[in-house]
Image: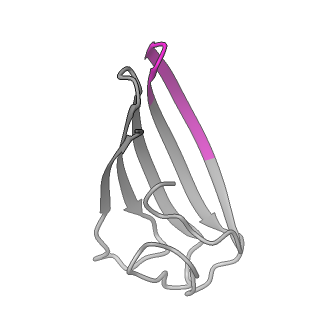
Amino acid sequence: GELFEPEINNIMIFTAGLGLKPSEKSSVDLVYHYYQQAVASDNLGGSNLEMDPNGLSRDLGHELDLVLGYREIKNVSLEGTLGAFVPGNAFQDDASSAYFANLEVKLRF
């Protein structure tokens, strides 16, 4: 996922997505990820999250990403990403959801 980005070690990831092309040079993608550790551990390694799992549950949580692409203007490309991660039972009860927003503009000369 765009937000969580875990190291691919001791983790299982289920991903499903839906993509639409409103025009030839634009796209809208909605991508869902479910994360689970193969073996419950209190170490994630390489994740963008600032919290660590408790080592008691394998359920890391869910992420939903919305990715928008726009390339209708010559020499200009825009990509916007919104992401939300909802922690699972592998985190403390007071763990809060995490959010991500990114806008990238590329100009070619």
Quick check: 95 above or below 5? Answer: below
**In this figure, which colouring scheme has been used for the structure?**
one colour
Residue 25, how many percent across, how many down?
46, 19
Quick check: 23 above or below 16? Answer: above
Magenta span includes 7? no
Which residue is at a point 61% across and 64% down the rendered structure image?
36
* Helix, strand or loop: magenta stretch: strand
For the residue pair 106 and 4, the one nearer the viewer reads as: 106
Residue 29, how many percent across, how many down?
46, 32
Residue 61, how many percent across, how many down?
48, 61
Magenta segment: 15-28
Which quadrant holds the C terminus? top left
For the residue pair 26 and 29, the one nearer the viewer reads as: 26
Residue lying farthest to the front in this orientation: 109
- Number of marks in the image? 0
For the residue pair 82 and 51, the one nearer the viewer reads as: 82
45 left or right of 100 in image: right
Residue 101, how many percent across, how many down?
29, 53
68 left or right of 24 in image: left
29 left or right of 70 in image: right
Magenta span includes 22? yes
Which residue is at a point 38% across and 20% down the rendered structure image?
72
Which residue is at a point 63% across and 72% down the rendered structure image?
7
Q: Quadrant of residue 38?
A: bottom right
